[in-house]
Amino acid sequence: MLPALFLLLWAGPAAAQFNPKKQAAKLEAVPDTLIKPAKPTTELKFELYSDAYDKYLRKLRSKQRNSYTFKPGLSITQVSFNNWQQGGDNSYSGLASLNFEHNYTAPVFSIKTVFDAKYGLMRTTGQTRKNVDYFNVSTTPSWNISERWKLSSSLIWRSQFSKSYDYPKDKPKVWKSSFMAPGTVEISGGFTYEPPSKKLNILLAPIAGKMTFVLNDSLARKGGLGVETGKKFKAEIGAQVRINYKTKFAKDKIEYITKLESFWNYTLPPSATWGNTLNFKFTNVVSAQLIVNMIYNDQITTPNAQEKRDEGRVPKPWDYLQIYQSVGFGLQFNIASKPHKPIQESTITRSRLKYKK
């Protein structure tokens, strides 16, 4: 009872002396220089980070951007005659093929590299000779400028693996061509059109350069390989068009691939190469293949054109058209990278020290 009474007697005078207006007036009278601002409080925020998980994401992203297909193949054909009234020559032929394609695809930049090669031998009338021999290497870097159009450049290298001979009847074989005799290198820059389906790819290059090589002294002196007689090199400037189309049907059992490449010299008629391949897939390994390739280049002497020249006549444009056809059954393997699922971006980032005032 006494402590409560004492507290009441002490607080009464103190409360009576407190006046808010007087206190505010006292604070206004104090100089600003004597009032120290309060120190800013520092707020720390931490976010988790994992080096191992970050490396894992980078590895997944690299796999997703890189894809490849590897298709080696081998086909063999044999024809035999025994007491056949119509006659004929026994023959054996084999064709080895290899196609490799690599694609790197980033959000803005992409690059496509293709290696395509075929080599075939035929044995008939006691002689072994080539029936097909070529390789093409191309690389095409591109930068996206819209959903369907890209700014692109291209590098193409073409030649053959080994020597080619002509076999006139009852005469020694004649050396016709060899590695890089002839060989061509084409460099171009322009635009690529590619729809989302990826089945069609069109390269339009208004600026292109073509270099033709005959890196063999005897063949260079002979001439007829697209370079002036006695010379080993020829450079041309012009434009280039390249069209690639690939599709599958019949439940993916049949695949059609076509490629048209044409180079226009600003001062000479254009040259063109058109390849068509039809693949029939019976099992994962056993397949059949139909190939029709055509080449037009009036700078290269063909047998028909040479025959007319020897007769004193002028060759017609179709005398320079070269056609190759092949039908074969054999083995073809298809090795390809597996498609990857989209990457789930992580919320785990580097730890940061943030200051807020």
Image: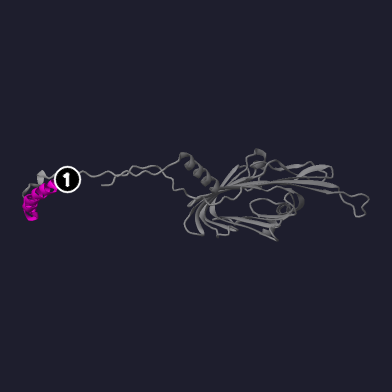
Q: Residue furthest front?
A: 1
Left or right relative to 193: residue 70: right
Is residue 283 at least partly visible in the picture? Answer: yes
Please provide percent x and percent y for residue 253. 71, 57
Please provide percent x and percent y for residue 141. 52, 49
Residue 168 or 248: which is nearer the viewer? Answer: 248
**Residue appearing at x 77%, y 51% in the figure:** 329
- Residue 178 among magenta residues: no
Amino acid type indicated by mark 1: Pro
Q: Is residue 136 above or below residue 148?
A: above
**Residue appearing at x 65%, y 39% in the figure:** 216
Q: Residues within 10 Å of mark 1 (few under 14, many from 20)?
A: few
Residue 136 or 179: which is nearer the viewer? Answer: 136
Q: Which residue is mark 1?
A: 37
Left or right relative to 150: residue 298: right
Dot 1 lies on which element?
A: loop
Residues in magenta?
1-28
Please provide percent x and percent y for residue 214. 63, 42
Please provide percent x and percent y for residue 7. 12, 48
Is residue 316 at least partly visible in the picture? Answer: no
**Residue appearing at x 58%, y 59% in the figure:** 197
